[in-house]
Amino acid sequence: MEANPKLVKSKLPIHNPEVGRIPPETIEQILASTDIVDLIGSYFPLKRSGSGFKINCPFHGEKTPSFNINPARQFYKCFGCDASGNALSFIMEYENLPFIDAVKKLADRAGITIIEEAHDPESDRKRRKISRIKELNNKAARFFHEQLLRSPDAEHARSYLKSRGFSKETTQKWLIGWAPRNSNLFLQIAREEGFTGREILQAGLGGLRNKEDSRSGLWVKFYDQLTFPINNDYGDVVGFSARILRADDKRGKYINTSDTPLFNKSKLLFALDKARRSMGKEKFALICEGQVDAIVLHECGFENTIAPLGTAFTEEHARMINRYTDRVVLCYDGDNAGLAAADKAFKQLTATGLPVKLMHLPDGDDPDTFIKTHGPEKFRTLLESAKDYFDAKLEKELPSINLSSAGERTKLLKDLGESVMVMSDDLLRDATIQNLAIRMRVGVDDFRQVVANAKKEKSRFRDNPRAADDTKIVVTPAPIDHVVAYLCHLALNSEAAAEYLIEQLESLNECLEEALGGHILLDILSKRPNPENTASRQAYLMTIPSEDRLALEKTFTDSVPDDPVASASDTVAMLSARFYQTKEKALRSLLNDPNLSSAEILTAFEEVKRLQSILKDLDQRF
Ligand code: ZN
């Protein structure tokens, strides 16, 4: 497919702690100091053509060059795909960089220091501090890498990498290193390079032995670990993720640099600097769970792979990805932890409007083990068959769920509702609601209600930050149909109404199984707490799940009607009528499905007839 640069996402300047507002004169100066022929020539061999140069267009596939570079006008134009622009737009498009970052890249290349408009001593100091942190991290990465390659004490680290199938080239490309067991070596090198103890602290690479005493000496964060440098978007090392190498090492398997102004796990994605271009070209990002998987995938040609650091996937991550690409495929482990992590990532990504697909590896496999066993081509096949997020999720979860159990279904519906709620694209959200309602065998309006309830819950938590605290388990009321809630209320408060409802159970069962909160009423009718006795009712309420209890709370203030049985009878009729109508409608729309076999059509048709006669009977009752 041809890339049309005009359709490439607009890469508006974003907030960046290192670059403030760049005055237009500086941009002019940068452009004046950049020769577009040199610039493009540093990426591709150029062919002379008249007064200018020609190359095969980097933005669309072609065999004969139609991409022209005009040195006099400092301009490029492709006659194949209409791409055109100056040095800055070339960097933005080809490197898939936002405006500010492209300016910075050209400025670095031209040796121009960017002086920001609003500058004051305080921000100067901050900037100096940040650039020292960066420098120290980059020096540390080189030092650890040298140690890995050459230290006689790093034999176990080298053989570990070899056992994982990392070649020397891979190790070099990713600047993988080994932090020496004797941490004094690192301190010594850092001091020789002119860094102070304070700077080592600020770079998150060590700590004070005694926090109260600045002269107590330093401990070093990384020792006898494999080090993976973590880069910012444009390739500077800003921290490390380090892995232990010995079975008796009591530290966590992976530890990261402590937070610094440059190292914030919620704002960094592993391999983004290397994946950025490919994410733009392929129009999607592949997100996996860990660094080793990301490296393996890159080395097998999946260069649009990125990974969060640790499991937390943040709003910031989603926004960063949205700047560089159009779609996302999640490749997470198929176990429960993996599914939960995928759920979290999906919610953040869909909130930015990015379409998300989910790919399934066989149980127990991660990308690394899968590719080692089956090869990269098999992985590509799986990737290409990745399904839309909800389809993939249901495919995975439905087989382990008993859909006719109202409890399990309600739980899954609520879970789905929470994910649908955050979708920012209205059309996509509505299509998803319709699709999920059919697959979950509920009415579209009922499911819409579930989504609306989830939304209400969320805003309630926003108003109450304590409830929103992720680390606390927050109980939300089970979704309940208001008609069902009223029947629960009658059953809990009137012996006669409860008796009546039990008589109706046989015909009620079908619609209660489907109705939201139906299981709550069924439970009340089977346990029969004594309506005359408040203590019995209270005791009963304490035995049911707290989300069910919360769902009933709303009805506690309702009054009991004079004739509870008549009310119950009217309510049951209303519930049944609605249930059979929804069911009949759903079946009739199912009949429009062209993929239905004739046997299926016949069954559905019989069912429609049965429902219509039930509805007619109900009609006669009014
Ligand atoms: Zn072109």
Image: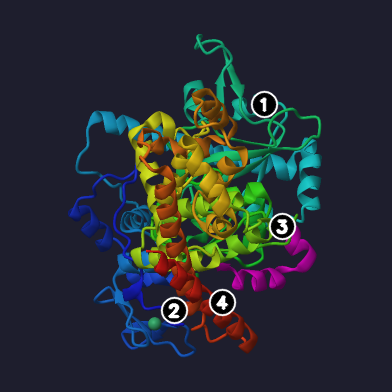
Q: Which mark is first along the chain, 1 or 2?
A: 2
Asked if disc 2 and disc 1 are in contact, CB closer than 8 Å, the reply is: no
- Cα gap from disc 1 to disc 3, whole angstroms: 31 Å
Q: How crowded is mark 1: few (under 14 residues within 10 Å), some or many (20 or more)?
A: some
Number of numbered discs: 4
Mark 4 element type: helix
Is residue 376 a member of the stretch shown in magenta?
Answer: yes
Residue under pointer 3 = 368
Residue under pointer 2 = 46
Is residue 384 a member of the stretch shown in magenta?
Answer: yes
Three-letter code, disc 3:
Asp
Residue under pointer 4 = 607
- Cα gap from disc 3 to disc 2, whole angstroms: 39 Å
Q: Give the range drawn in magenta.
A: 368-388
Task: Give residue 367's position: percent from left, percent from top.
Answer: 69, 59
- Cα gap from disc 4 to disc 1, whole angstroms: 76 Å
In depth, the one of 38 and 571 nearer the eye is 571
Three-letter code, disc 2:
Leu
Of marks 2 and 1, the one in the foreground: 1
Q: Which mark is first along the chain, 3 or 4?
A: 3
Q: How crowded is mark 4: few (under 14 residues within 10 Å), some or many (20 or more)?
A: some
Q: Is the magenta stretch mostly helix, strand or loop?
A: helix
On the picture, is 287 further left or further right than 292?
left
Q: In which quarter of the image is the C terminus?
A: bottom left
Three-letter code, disc 1:
Ser
Cβ of mark 4 under 8 Å from ligand 1: the answer is no
Three-letter code, disc 4:
Glu
Residue under pointer 1 = 183
Task: Give residue 39's position: percent from left, percent from top.
Answer: 39, 67
